[in-house]
Image (cartoon, grey):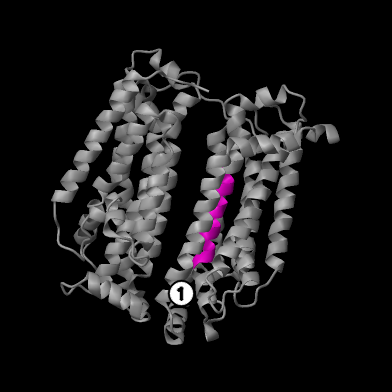
């Protein structure tokens, strides 16, 4: 048995050495965002009256479905409010971090042939998987400590050190469940894309299961790692039993993954890949048809995600007035921003529009990165062996991402308007919401253009587009509350878009951002045509 795990310790250090920057950025980003929101939210609802008003708002079924159940509402403290509002969201980010960590060092490395090189050395058959899981444990322990000590450093009355460590522990233990579940999917599937898709679907399914359980049959929430994390009732009862259940689930998934890894062949999955047709259809005779087929999963999955976000935000829009009236800080902020007589609802809709646009930008970047992914795996060389130019292929994926952004925005706003029409009286006009959503397309295109430029010149750093998107999300979501200077806010393309219906329409920033997108795209195309194609 020990031979199966021989060399695990060395591989742990090897993985940490390879991912020292990536892991540091992930942990620091998730922990930093969690900690940075403490003073922002606690200052937003500073008095007992404001906190109690917020507690009543959070009892709304739509709010419960979005962020989780309310605990300690009779004496709603700043800690209880923060855990209620942030724990599920932060746990999802921790889950995504763990999914990408495990897929990168298991199925992805195996698909690229790296694991075969590792296995040719004197290491055990299960050593790489075991090392990956140990790195996941170390990463989540570090996340727990950074979150716990960071939150306690603000010395908020109801947020002590032990309680804050439990907050971080709930994030870390749930993250380990997603890491181990991903390890199982990596053994079942025969390629990285399917394993990653199933893992992210598991994360989204856990969120939806928790939402259904929190507003309906509570037993469903106990099946979801996110539901269990919220049952710790941090800063209220501080229960430890959900942590033990999550750690038990992590152990069970990990053992299952190790057993499956022992019996399967390298490069294969327990569930064999479905054989394709002997001959491709007419759809595959051109780059566009092939790109649409390869991106089909991303397009369908993210269409469902943006619709879900639209429905969730649209269903709570009727609570906006009481939500803002519950905080003097929010009243001052929105009144200052809406000096033209705009209603609080219109101002809040403007904020929701930009948040949904940021969400829609994620798959747009992913679609453009497909060029780099296909190149890295060596598939794109087979296409260039035919009569297909680099310009045509690059432009095809760019066009799919460009049109995808329009589709995602349309679906999000259609779902938002449909849900809002049910709750608001009179029902809002679709055209007003449609125009507000489509205004953000040039900002999304700037992110697309930046990704295209990186793919063209420095494909190994193309994921920087996600980092820039994360910065844009922070400036949009917390920039005003954090009192960031205008020049910092202005670094995000979303900052320059007029927020309809709160603000008047201006076309100059839209034209300028579109021009920046065009310039970045041309730069990316020039770089892609001139550089060497690299695989592996």
**Highlighted magenta segment, given as a residue range:** 86-100
Residue at figure coordinates x 64%, y 77% from the top left: 237
Residue 21 falls left or right of residue 358: right
Q: Position of residue 380 (x, y in %)?
A: 43, 21
Task: Specify whether residue 224 is in view.
Answer: no
Label 1 crowding class (10 Å Cα cut-off): few <14, some 14-19, many 20+?
A: some
* Residue ranking furthest to the right: 1
For the N terminus, the quadrant is top right
**Where is mark 1, residue-wise?**
42
Looking at this view, is 339 or 256 the one in front? 339
Q: Position of residue 506 (x, y in %)?
A: 14, 55
State the count of labels: 1
Task: Specify whether residue 285 is in view.
Answer: yes
Q: Quadrant of residue 338?
A: bottom left
Q: Quadrant of residue 263?
A: top right
Name above or below for residue 117 compared with residue 305. above
What secondary structure is the stretch in magenta mostly built from? helix
Q: Position of residue 269 (x, y in %)?
A: 65, 32
User: Within the magenta stretch, is there residue 404?
Assistant: no
Looking at this view, is 177 or 480 the one in front? 480
User: Within the magenta stretch, is there residue 91?
Assistant: yes
**Which element carries disc 1, helix, strand or loop?**
helix
Name above or below for residue 273 compared with residue 504. above
Residue 502 falls left or right of residue 331: left
Residue at figure coordinates x 59%, y 75% from the top left: 235
Name above or below for residue 63 compared with residue 411. below
Q: Position of residue 32 (x, y in %)?
A: 50, 57
């Amino acid at each position: 048995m020990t031979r199966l795990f021989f060399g695990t310790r060395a591989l742990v250090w090897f993985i940490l050495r390879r991912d020292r920057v990536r892991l540091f950025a992930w942990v620091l980003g998730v922990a930093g965002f969690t900690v940075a929101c403490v003073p922002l939210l606690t200052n937003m609802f500073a008095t007992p009256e404001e906190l109690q008003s917020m507690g009543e708002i959070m009892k709304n079924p739509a709010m419960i479905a979005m962020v989780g159940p309310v605990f300690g509402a009779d004496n709603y403290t700043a800690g209880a409010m923060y855990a209620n509002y942030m724990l599920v969201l932060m746990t999802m980010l921790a889950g995504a971090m763990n999914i990408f960590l495990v897929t990168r060092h298991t199925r992805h490395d195996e698909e690229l042939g790296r694991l075969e090189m590792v296995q040719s050395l004197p290491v055990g058959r299960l050593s790489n998987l075991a090392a990956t899981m140990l790195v996941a444990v170390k990463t989540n322990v570090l996340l727990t400590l950074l979150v716990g000590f960071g939150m306690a450093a603000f010395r908020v009355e109801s947020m002590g050190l032990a309680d804050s460590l439990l907050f971080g522990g709930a994030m870390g233990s749930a993250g380990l469940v997603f890491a181990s579940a991903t390890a199982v999917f990596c053994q079942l599937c025969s390629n990285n894309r399917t394993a990653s898709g199933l893992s992210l679907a598991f994360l989204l399914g856990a969120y939806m299961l928790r939402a259904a359980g929190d507003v309906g049959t509570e037993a469903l929430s106990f099946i979801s790692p996110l539901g269990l994390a919220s049952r710790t009732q941090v800063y209220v009862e501080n229960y430890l039993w959900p942590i033990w259940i999550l750690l038990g689930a992590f152990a069970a998934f990990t053992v299952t993954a190790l057993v499956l890894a022992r019996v399967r062949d390298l490069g294969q999955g327990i569930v064999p890949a479905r054989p394709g047709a002997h001959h491709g259809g007419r759809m595959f005779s051109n780059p566009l048809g092939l790109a649409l087929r390869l991106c089909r999963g991303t397009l369908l999955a993210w269409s469902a995600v943006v619709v879900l976000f639209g429905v969730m935000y649209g269903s709570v829009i009727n609570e906006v007035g009481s939500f803002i009236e519950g905080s003097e800080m929010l009243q001052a902020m929105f009144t200052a921003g809406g000096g033209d007589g705009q209603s609080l609802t219109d101002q809040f809709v403007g904020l929701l529009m930009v948040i949904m646009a940021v969400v829609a930008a994620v798959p747009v970047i992913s679609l453009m990165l497909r060029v780099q992914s296909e190149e890295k795996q060596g598939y794109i060389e087979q296409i260039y062996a035919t009569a297909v130019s680099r310009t045509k292929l690059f432009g095809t994926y760019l066009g799919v991402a460009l049109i995808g952004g329009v589709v995602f925005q349309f679906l999000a706003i259609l779902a938002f308007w449909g849900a809002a029409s049910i709750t608001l009286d009179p029902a809002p006009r679709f055209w007003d919401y449609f125009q507000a959503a489509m205004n953000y397309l040039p900002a999304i295109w700037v992110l697309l253009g930046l990704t295209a430029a990186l793919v063209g010149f420095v494909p190994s750093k193309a994921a920087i587009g996600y980092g820039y998107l994360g910065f844009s999300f922070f400036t949009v979501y917390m920039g005003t509350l954090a009192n960031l200077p205008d020049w910092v806010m202005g670094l995000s393309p979303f900052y320059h878009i007029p927020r309809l219906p709160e603000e008047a329409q201006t076309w100059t920033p839209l034209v300028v951002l579109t021009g920046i997108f065009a310039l970045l795209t041309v730069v990316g195309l020039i770089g892609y045509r001139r550089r060497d194609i690299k695989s592996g």
